[in-house]
Amino acid sequence: MKKAIIAATTAALLAGSVATYAAGPGPGPAGGPQGGPPAAAEQAKWKLSPADRAALTDARIAALKTGLKLTPDQEKLWPAVEDALRATASDASARRAEMQKARADNPKPDPIERLRVQADMMTSRAGDLKKIADAAEPLYKTLDDGQKHRLQILLREDLSQGRFMHHGPGQGQGGPRRG
């Protein structure tokens, strides 16, 4: 049951859920004309502003809540879940800013430094996942089978596209694990 909670709530990590759109391929077989890198204008067109990310976060949270069709008793448990999702989105935004600054400060880090940075980011994300799981567990325990089914449907696209962990297309695929 804990794995199902973690898988479901992990997918709800909203902060980076829209990053896939920004990383999506442009024209041509490898992203740009004749398979070259995408043009700067094409990349800029899909870059999301903080306001875009906030609006999409709001929309995903609202869609999740609406799709679950919570009962009045379940509604009382929702604020903790929403707070955890919003805190996670904020943390992911801060990590994204740190990563961008680190890349600007040191565009060619050595492999060992990259490993350390990635390990630190994974540790931070793991902490966020635990916070979401802890916040969502009381609500999840009250969901009926229909709500649990809808939850998986609502999160399936995010899971299959790897959006929940800032991956681009084709990475982080799978889906909710059972067990």
Image: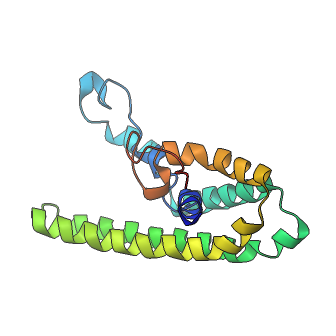
- Locate residue 43, reporting x and y percent: 38, 43
The x and y percentages for residue 59 are 68, 56
For residue 102, side relative to residue 74 (left or right):
left
The one nearer the camera, 133 or 29, is: 133
Residue 90 visible (yes or no): no
User: Which residue is drawn at the image coordinates 40% and 48% (left, top)?
Assistant: 172
Residue drawn at x 79%, y 57% is 144
Question: In which quadrant will I find the C terminus?
Answer: bottom right
Q: Residue at x 64, y 59 (%)?
A: 55
Left of 173 or right of it: where is 141? right
Q: Position of residue 28 (x, y in %)?
A: 33, 24
The vertical placement of 177 against 82, above or below, is above
| Extreme-front residue of the structure | 179
Question: Residue 56 sits in which quadrant?
Answer: bottom right
Between residue 68 and residue 42, name the one nearer to us. Answer: 68
37 or 45, nearer to the observer: 37
